[in-house]
Amino acid sequence: GINKAKTMGFNTMLLTTYLEGEAKEVAHALSSIVKEIKTQTIQLIYLGNYCWWRDNR
């Protein structure tokens, strides 16, 4: 009984650690994607404003 409980506890701990690691990886990947999208969007806005300004001078 005790060994089985220990093993289960250890497995749970491993799984939790693994899932936390995965969550961090996913969060990191998502934040990178968001940053990339923000950068692209800002560049597009600048480009759009520049073209508008150039055409409407």
Image (cartoon, helix red, strand yellow):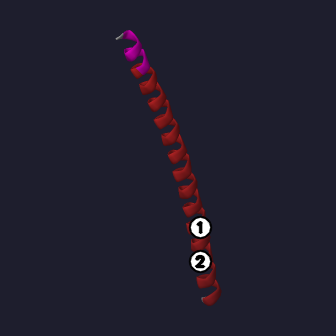
Mark 2 residue element: helix
Q: Give the amino acid type for the residue marked by disc 1 in the picture.
A: Gln
Classed neighbour count for the residue bearing mark 1: other residues with Cα under 10 Å, few (<14), some (14–19), many (≥20): few
- Residue 40's disc number: 1
Where residue 51 appears, x then y in whole percent? 62, 83
Image point 62% across, 70% down: which residue? 43
* Residue 57 appears in the figure: no
Vertical comparison of 16 with 49: above or below:
above
> Which is more N-terminal, label 2 or label 1?
1
Amino acid type for the residue under numbered disc 2: Asn
Residue at 38% x, 16% y is 4
Quadrant placement of the N terminus: top left
Q: Which residue is mark 2?
A: 49
Instruction: Note whether 9 is above or below 17 in the view shown.
Output: above
Real-space CA distance between mark 1 and mark 2, rounded to the nearest whole angstrom: 14 Å
Q: Which one is nearer the viewer's eye here, 42 or 26?
A: 26
Q: Residue furthest top?
A: 2
Residue 56 % position (x, y): 60, 88
Q: Which mark is residue 7?
A: none
Q: Label 2: how many residues lie within 10 Å, few (<14), some (14-19) or many (20+)?
A: few
The segment highlighted magenta reads: 2-7
In percent of width and height, residue 53 lies at 62, 83
